[in-house]
Image (tube, grey):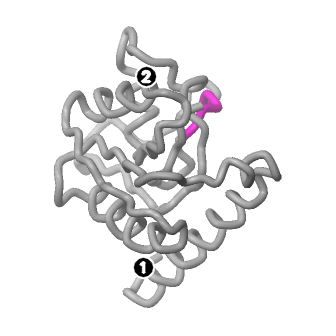
Amino acid sequence: MTFDRHSAFRLLRTTMIGLAFASIAQGNAALAQDWPSQPIRMIIGFIPGTSPDIVGRIVADKLGPRLGQRIVVESVPAGGGTVANDMVAKAPANSHMLLMLTASHPGTVATRKSLPYDPVKDFAMVTKVVAYPMVLLTKPDSPILSHAPKRRPTNYPGAPTPSAAFTICWRN
């Protein structure tokens, strides 16, 4: 599956419309709070110029005018995204912060003995922004012939499907 520029923008437009409807669907209580009341910080745990950064800036440019607030994209490139995740997890509940998670989030959870945040309880998924297919390759003479999961995957925000994805999460 390939995306040309037109398809990518159509996907982005559809995602933005879905995000707008999701915000409206939060109910009258959310509408009564007049959110957002200040600029929004979108935290990305990777260096500028990487795919999450580029996607985050595209989303911020399109979503900010729709919400009537500026979205400031901040790169916090340390610990494979763990520092950024912890920063958002420990922020006050109404801190106007969004977190761009990538498909590496489940890998981080699986390979770390402990994390300074709870990857399930500390975040609420807002929307999946981008999904693309992934391919696992090996050398032709490798003994690895297939990838079969040994156990059922855990269900948590950002859990990968057969594709990689960028997901926007909100602090729970």
Which disc is residue 49 wearing?
A: none
Q: Report the quarter where the C terminus lies.
A: top right
Where residue 74 sits in the image (x, y, percent)?
26, 48
The residue at the point 42 percent across, 79 percent down is: 2
Left or right for 57, reference 95: left
Q: What residue type is disc 2 on?
A: Lys
- For the residue pair 2 and 14, the one nearer the viewer reads as 14
Q: Crowding at label 1, few (<14), some or many (≥20) Cα neighbours within 10 Å?
A: few
Q: Is residue 8 visible?
A: yes
Q: Is residue 15 above or below residue 101?
A: below
Quadrant of the image occupied by residue 34: bottom right
Q: Residue at x 44, y 79 (%)?
A: 8
Reply above or below: 77 against 127: above
Question: Which residue range is magenta in the image?
Answer: 153-157
Q: Which mark is residue 90?
A: 2
The x and y percentages for residue 19 are: 62, 63
